[in-house]
Structures are given as C-alpha cells and as structure tokens.
Image (cartoon, grey):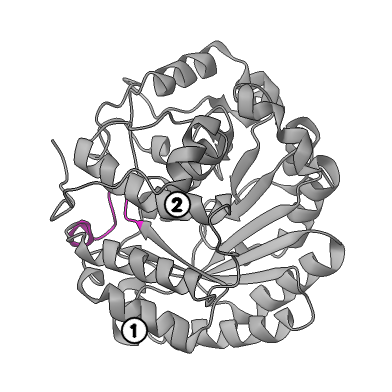
Amino acid sequence: MSSPLRFLPRLLFPAGYPPLQLILFVTGRCNARCGHCFYAGQLEHGHPGPSLEQYAALARSSGPLLWLSLTGGEPFLRDDLPEIARLFVRRTGVRQLTIPTNGLATKRIIESTRRILQLHRGLNLVVYLSIDGPPEVHDELRGVPGCYERARETWSELRRLKGGHRRLNLATITTICHANHQRLPDVFELLLRDFAPDDVVLNMLRGVPADELQADFELAGFAAFQRMKEAALREGRLPHFSFNPLDVLAAKERYQWRLILELLNRRRQVVPCLGGALSGVVAEDGHLYPCETLMAQPGEDPLQREHFCENSPAALGNLHDVGWNMPALWWSKRARHIRRRISQGRCWCTYECAWTTSLLFNPRLWWPMLTGRPRPEDLPERLVRGG
C-alpha cells in the first residue's frame, strides 16, 4: 500500500506523473435508464469495457495512486470487478477505492464487495448508493419500477456486511435535478432517517441529461441540503468525517459546495483546476481524458464557457493505440496542450471529483477553506443553461 506521505511533493509540483486520482469507466452497460444521466448517449451502445489484460497493462504503467474510482455504467455488472480492483491495489498501492451503484443488482453487489474487502487488507472502500428522492420520485427518475425498494434491500445487505468490515464506508449520493430540487431538505432527512449513511453527497447535475427537463431546477434546495449536511457533521451524525476546525476534509466539503455556486454565478474558473494534472479518466472504450466533463462532444455541454478542442472531445488519446501504456498519452503533445488550456481557465465546470483533488492539493486554498470562503452573496435562482 502507498503511504499518503509519498504524495506530499505534488502539493508544490502538481503537474507530473502519475495522476493521483484515476477514474475508470469499467463498463458502458447499465440496468437503469436515468433521466438525469449525463452519460446516457454512451450507455445506449452498451460497451462491455476493457479486458482484464488491458487493465493489467494500465495498472503496470500507472504508478502510485492515491484514489481509484470504478464507475460506469453500473460497475457491479462486471463479474470481474474485484479482479480489476486487485490489479490496481497490487500494482499502484492505492488505499482509497470508491464505487458508485444504483443498487439494483443486489447479489452481484454484495458478492463483489465482500470479495474486494477480503482480498485487500488495509484498503478503504466506499460504496456510494444513488438515492434521488422518495420512492415515487426515485423510481420515475431511474426508469425502473421498484428501484427504490431494491436499492433499500441492497443497502440493508451492505450494512450487514459492514458489521464485519470496519474499512467499508457506505454513503448515499443524490443529484439535484428538476424532479427533486424542491424536495431536497426532505430528501436529506429521509436519507439520515432511513439509511443512516456514513456520508451524504449531493452532486450538481452536469452535461446534457437524457431528459432535458431535468436540467431545469432552482438552486435554493441545493444550498439548503448542504447547510443541513454541515449541521449533521457538527452533530456527529455523519461518521465519515470528524468535524473540527482543523479537519481539512470537512473544511473542503464546506468550501466546495460554495465554490460550485460561485462557479455557476461567474461562469468561469474561480480557483485553478488541476484536471489532467492530478486526475485522469479512462472511458470504457479506452479513451483517456483529463476529467469527465471534457468527455462531451464540442458544444454538447452548454455549461462550458469555451470548449477548447475544436473538432473532438478533449481526449488525450486512446489507450488501445499505445498498448495501454498511460505515460505514452500523458506526456503527448496533445496532452500538454489540453493541460495548458485547462490551466489557462479555458473551461469551467462543477465536476466534484476534479475539484476535490484541485482543492486539497492547492495549499494556497487551505486557509480560505478553513475560514469558510468563498461565501457567494448572491444565490443564482436557477441553473442557467447555455449562454
């Protein structure tokens, strides 16, 4: 396992190799059809994802990792998900693994989670269960009747598994959209009452969702939910964090959601983004990207102030073309060009995963985080698309 101390030099020199945060879209298959999904177009193709041999080559070339996320699609649809995790733990020493799920494939989820925990002593695993509202809202949004109850069943089984594995954290993840934006305070109470999670996460909808109506929502509920989360942290109701004035992770949580509102207000980068320097995303078809937002086709995502790759998504290249040897793409002329454009503020977004590393690995932001800035005075009434 890699000691977190080995990553300290990247606080001063974030650019380099390897990316400390790697997000793998392990499959383009999904057993739900969510109206708020930004990846719906790709899911229609149902790409099965890279082979174990290809992931083995990627892991060999990746170098030490701080954080690995296995996503999709529905990642637990891959029977070999534990083997993918094992490859990267052995080769990169990663200690932090996160896996999101819609909770529909209960048996697969429990079996894979158990195998991952048994294989890797010292690995911290967070399973994020998507819950977007009460049963009627969640089921309609997910396009699967009974989705909420099946997710609850999965959660109950995960809670039993957690009883014997202290390294397993269980969190819920909600995406604000038209279907739930007016009910988010009630959703927060539902989550704490019925799920008792270690953490609750509220993400901003991004990209162009499958149901474009879901992109029309007000932001008051987003702020209310986040303030309720802060109160729950102070009260010790979310054990994933220890809440005190010097807790950098909790401070990052308080800072990040306000930063997202500031981004939506100003429609430009407010603080430097380290996407493509500290983070990388590998799609199920082998393309390597600096972040998830820049996986969109040019002009496809109206939240982008300026999409700086004129004729194609901002892919650094395709790993199929280089034998899954990531440095060959990471140090390419195109990759340097894309990183330079990001550092120049030529794009902006609200992508939470990229902002997590961008905030934590920028020491100049630690004081603003610990003091609770930025605090935007004006809350945008509604997420404005386009322009």
Q: Is residue 207 visible?
A: no
Of residues 107 and 62, the one drawn nearer to the viewer in this rendering:
62
Mark closer to the observer (1, 2): 1
Badge 2 element: loop
User: Residue shown at 39%/84% (left/top)?
Assistant: 190
Quarter of the image where one finds residue 114: bottom right
Q: Residue 132 location in percent, x, y?
A: 36, 73
Q: Which residue is mark 1?
A: 134
Mark sitting earlier along the chain (1/2):
2
Mark 1 Cα within 10 Å, few/some/many (few <14, many 20+)?
some
Q: Which mark is residue 281?
A: none
Q: Is residue 302 magenta?
A: no
Q: Which mark is residue 45?
A: 2
Please state if 337 lies on the left or on the right of 327 as rendered.
left
Quadrant assignment for the C terminus: top left
Quarter of the image where one finds residue 58: top right
Q: Is residue 256 above or below residue 160?
A: above
Between the residue at mark 1 and the residue at mark 2, the CA separation in whole angstroms equals 30 Å
What's drawn in magenta, residue-wise?
204-215
Of residues 25 and 42, the one drawn nearer to the viewer in this rendering:
25
Kind of residue at badge 1: Pro
Q: Residue 79 location in percent, x, y?
A: 71, 65
Q: Residue 152 location in percent, x, y?
A: 51, 86
Kind of residue at badge 2: His
User: Residue shown at 80%/49% (left/top)?
Assistant: 89
Which residue is at the far top?
333
User: Residue shown at 62%/16% (left/top)?
Assistant: 331
